[in-house]
Image (cartoon, grey):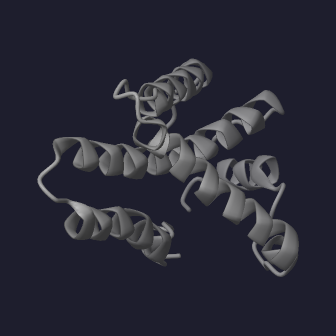
Amino acid sequence: MSPRTAVPTNALIVACSIPVVLCLIIYVGSDQVLTQFTSFAVIGIYVAFQSVVLAALRQRIKGWKPAGPFSLGRAGFVVNVLALAYGIFAMVLLAVPGASGEFFSDYIVLIGLFVVMGSGLIYLLVARPDRKSLAPEGDAIEVATLLRAHPDH
């Protein structure tokens, strides 16, 4: 995590770099190949960011009210729902199979997504990195309350 931005920098670099490298290596003049790999990269980024949007919506439903210098107030819930709907719609558009008649070519984005998600799930279940983490969890409501109590932070 970047201490300045609190963003998983290395994960973002890897998630964006691998598709670029694959495009440079595999691209042989076919626009279709470039479109497929770009779609795969973009859908992966959407999945990552929509998981955060979904988690925020889940916490809002459980009673979390974001604290900090910027707030959308009651509109925040609606914006959160619209953001999730937009992200899901975009992912569906990216995942729609092609119409070339070649199974692998038409479904490469979905195949790649399931391979990456499946290998991530296997890693999660086998290595259990969640049990080794020291990161706090389940504290969104308490942290927001503390932030509201001390607005100068």
| 43 lies above or below 14 | above
Give the residue drawn at x 45%, y 50%: 45
Compare residues 31 and 13 and report the one nearer the observer: 31
The reply to whether residue 150 is visible in this rendering is: no
- Residue 52 visible at all: yes
Could you tell me which residue is drawn at 56 percent across and 40 percent down?
50
Q: Nearer the viewer, residue 81 or 125?
A: 125
Residue under the point 11% across and 53% down = 29
Q: What percent of the width, then of the height, locates residue 117?
A: 65, 55
| Residue with the most extreme left position | 29
Q: Is residue 144 left or right of residue 34?
A: right
In this rendering, would 87 be left or right of 60?
Answer: left
Percent coordinates x, y for residue 68 in the rendering: 55, 48
Name which residue lies at 42% across and 25% down: 93
Task: Pick the residue in front: 95 or 10.
Answer: 95
Foreground of the two, 137 or 108: 108
132 to 97, vertically: above or below: below
| Image coords of residue 22 (percent x, y) | 31, 66
Q: Is residue 40 left or right of residue 111?
A: left
Image coordinates for residue 150, horizontal then vertical, percent: 65, 57
| Count of numbered circles on the image | 0
Quadrant where the image shows the C terminus: bottom right
